Amino acid sequence: MTRIAVIGTAGSGKSTIAAAIAQTLGVPRLELDSLHWQANWTRAQPDQMRSEVAAFMSEAVNGGSWVIDGNYRGILGNQVLDGADTVVWLDPIRSRMITQSARRSIRRTVTREELWNGNREPRADFFLAWRDHSVLTWSRAIVDMNRPRYLRILQAPENAHLTVVRLRNRAQTDGFLADLRRSAGIESSQE
């Protein structure tokens, strides 16, 4: 594993796991949300985002390594998967993803945590959870659509070069990270 794409539905833990992988391997990480969401929740231009992803990936030429977390296939197409050798697919059960999204939204709303480019999660979006642009509403709607979509994508012939690691629960995720630390030569006392 040298070029790793971390994918999954909102609330699956992509950013957390991607950060742990990158730290363990000592490689750079790119969070696609940080490119997509510009100041004042303005979306980046698709060409700009594709260019920035290409620049990040090109730094890994000649054996370089990286971790990229996020989806954005509508903008990036197969760009990230074409350059990856491994996909870590976070695919927990629906209720866990929705619960994690809710907890994350509560934390971000209460702490006023800065997300990307000065953006903070709008308080109204959490408390008015039925609104179309609410993170919670979006998570509930998208979770059931993503699993079959990811299966199709990962089984497509153009992605046959990928090693796919599908993590369905916390025990599998913890085991994967522990194995990664061992393979990176990190002592178990540091886990």
Image (cartoon, rainbow, N blue to C red):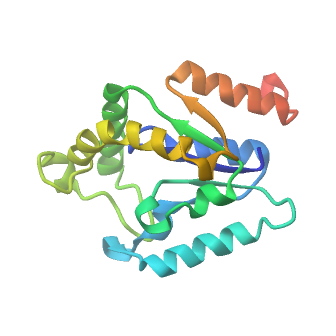
Residue 59 visible somewhere in the drawing: yes
The residue sitting at 84% across, 36% down in the picture is 184
Q: Position of residue 106 (x, y in %)?
A: 29, 42
Q: Position of residue 84 (x, y in %)?
A: 68, 54
Q: Position of residue 4 (x, y in %)?
A: 67, 49
Q: Quadrant of the N terminus?
A: top right
The residue sitting at 32% across, 31% down in the picture is 99
Compared across the picture, whether 45 is left or right of 81 comes to left
Compared across the picture, whether 3 is left or right of 42 comes to right
Q: Nearer the viewer, residue 186 or 111?
A: 186
Q: Nearer the viewer, residue 156 or 83?
A: 156
Position of residue 95 relative to residue 48, above or below, is above
**Residue 9, image quadrant:** top left
Position of residue 151 relative to residue 123, above or below, is above
The residue sitting at 44% across, 68% down in the picture is 75
**Residue 116, image quadrant:** bottom left
Compared across the picture, whether 77 is left or right of 18 comes to left
Q: Quadrant of the C terminus?
A: top right
Position of residue 43 relative to residue 130, above or below, is below
